[in-house]
């Protein structure tokens, strides 16, 4: 059995010479490698970070990884963390070391990136109906007997397309698929039990596919945790459970998979979907948690710690209670909530431009031009994708890691 990730390929990120390509990091680091810099554990700001700069907190990452791994173990579920959250092989390695059984991807390009770092077990949480993509996947599967991948199917035409493409590619190994249970008004996924059964039968009948389980995504409709919304999530998960029971005779493996669960409803998934099969969660955002969406909705809010923030400088105080910082939509997420200044209780961000943020200062808060401010974020996925190299700080604010992302 090969390792779950290629440690040497991951470690190579620490030997890449740093230069102007990486925004925010001190120019005094140019020409040196992460390994050399971290050996000295410098202070990011004394070394000359330029605003804005995104940072990770090592202790919070470690705490969240351990907390989630323990929780999964207690509840008898597996975790295949969504790698699209950070696209950072160094973080995937830590998640796998803590017991994650696979890494989840949303697209085939992400799977290709994972494979460049030797990720052995991949859940492609999506339909794959791309002939070129299927050709690549089957070549990769045939070349690497230890590589395990699975994707989802939600239509008979999709099953037929996959079968035709894999036959044309001369695939030797079948591709593992889960039938995806959808919901009215949701995203992908079969609508209704009859469609689920029809697609499952088609997949089981295909000589190029192996039906291994049932998949779904309960947060396709949102992240509302009010009782009415939770009842809808529970009912949906109940439909997934019923499908897993009903389709039992069709599965082409004795290690059936039932997979659901982002970072908002994973407790409901464990409540409803554990059974005589492998229950696989795909939470991604739990890793860094946040000060917004997941701070409000995670089942382990109060236990997880926000690990990802963005620092910016005040560049202008042009009028009254207005301050402008050099952090904008290029640097921080804005799809769920605007960023939140961490140490200014009365101040709010009211607007972001591409490269500027607008702060309305509260009565008790005062900031000066040139000062640094730290911002909590809402929704880590859309922060990570704006940064290619993220300093990781210890409790004393020393740089102990440099996390490389590949979006
Ligand atoms: C299909 C699927 N599974 C799992 C996740 C992970 O959920 P979260 O981002 O809440 O951790 C996502 C996120 O978008 C998703 O689309």
Image (cartoon, rainbow, N blue to C red):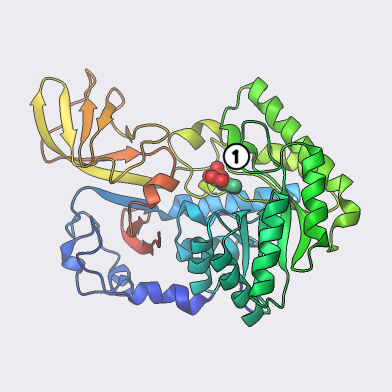
Q: Residue at x 16, y 29 (%)?
A: 323
Q: Position of residue 55 (x, y in %)?
A: 33, 52
Is label 1 in a helix, a strand or a loop?
loop
Q: Position of residue 143 (x, y in %)?
A: 62, 82
Vertical position of residue 194 compared to residue 34: above or below: above
> Is ligand 1 within 8 Å of the beta carbon of the residue shown at mark 1?
yes
Which residue carries the number 1 mark? 187
Vertical position of residue 13 compared to residue 272: above or below: below
Q: Residue at x 63, y 75 (%)?
A: 169
Residue 210 visible? The answer is: yes
Residue 257 visible? The answer is: no
Pointer 1: residues within 10 angstroms few (<14), some, or many (20+)?
Answer: few
The residue lying furthest to the left in this view is 318
* Left or right, 356 with reference to 93: left
User: Which one is in front, 45 or 286?
Assistant: 286
The quarter of the image holding the C terminus is: bottom left
Q: Residue at x 71, y 78 (%)?
A: 172
Q: Position of residue 38 (x, y in %)?
A: 32, 68
The quarter of the image holding the N terminus is: bottom right
The residue lying furthest to the right in this view is 249
Q: Position of residue 327 (x, y in %)?
A: 23, 41
* Left or right, 131 with reference to 42: right
Vertical position of residue 23 compared to residue 235: above or below: below
Vertical position of residue 235 compared to residue 328: above or below: above
Q: Residue at x 21, y 30 (%)?
A: 358
């Amino acid at each position: 059995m090969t390792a779950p990730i290629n440690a040497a390929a991951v470690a190579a990120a620490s030997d890449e010479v740093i230069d102007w390509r990486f925004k925010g990091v001190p120019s005094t680091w140019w020409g040196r490698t992460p390994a050399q810099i971290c050996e000295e554990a410098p202070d990011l700001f004394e070394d000359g970070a330029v605003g804005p700069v995104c940072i990770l907190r090592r202790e919070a990452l470690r705490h969240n990884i351990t907390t989630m791994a323990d929780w999964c173990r207690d509840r008898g579920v597996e975790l295949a963390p969504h790698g699209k959250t950070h696209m950072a092989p160094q973080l995937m390695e830590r998640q796998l070391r803590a017991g994650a059984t696979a890494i989840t991807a949303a697209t085939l390009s992400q799977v290709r990136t994972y494979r460049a770092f030797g990720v052995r077990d991949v859940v492609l949480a999506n339909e794959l109906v791309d002939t070129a993509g299927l050709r690549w996947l089957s070549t990769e599967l045939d070349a690497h007997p230890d590589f395990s991948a699975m994707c989802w199917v939600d239509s008979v035409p999709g099953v037929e397309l996959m079968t035709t493409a894999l036959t044309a590619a001369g695939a030797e190994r079948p591709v593992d698929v889960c039938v995806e249970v959808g919901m009215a008004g949701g995203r992908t996924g079969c609508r209704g039990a009859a469609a689920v059964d029809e697609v499952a039968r088609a997949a089981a009948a295909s000589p190029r596919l192996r039906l291994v389980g049932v998949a779904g995504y309960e947060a396709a409709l949102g992240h509302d945790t009010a009782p009415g919304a939770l009842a809808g999530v529970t009912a949906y998960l109940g439909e997934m459970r019923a499908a897993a029971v009903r389709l039992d005779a069709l599965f082409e493996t004795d290690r059936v998979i039932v997979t659901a669960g982002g970072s908002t409803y994973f407790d409901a998934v464990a409540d409803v979907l554990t059974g005589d099969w492998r229950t696989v969660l795909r939470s991604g955002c739990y890793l860094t948690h946040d000060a917004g969406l997941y701070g409000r909705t995670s089942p382990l809010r109060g236990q997880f710690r926000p690990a990802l923030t963005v620092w910016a400088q005040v560049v202008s105080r042009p009028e009254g209670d207005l301050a402008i910082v050099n952090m904008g939509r290029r640097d921080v997420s804005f799809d769920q909530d605007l960023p939140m200044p961490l140490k200014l209780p009365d101040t709010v961000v009211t607007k972001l431009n591409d490269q500027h943020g607008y702060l309305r200062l509260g009565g008790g808060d005062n900031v000066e031009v040139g000062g640094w401010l730290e911002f909590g974020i809402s929704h880590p996925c859309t922060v990570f994708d704006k940064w290619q190299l993220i300093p990781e700080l210890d409790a004393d604010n020393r740089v102990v890691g440099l996390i490389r992302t590949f979006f």
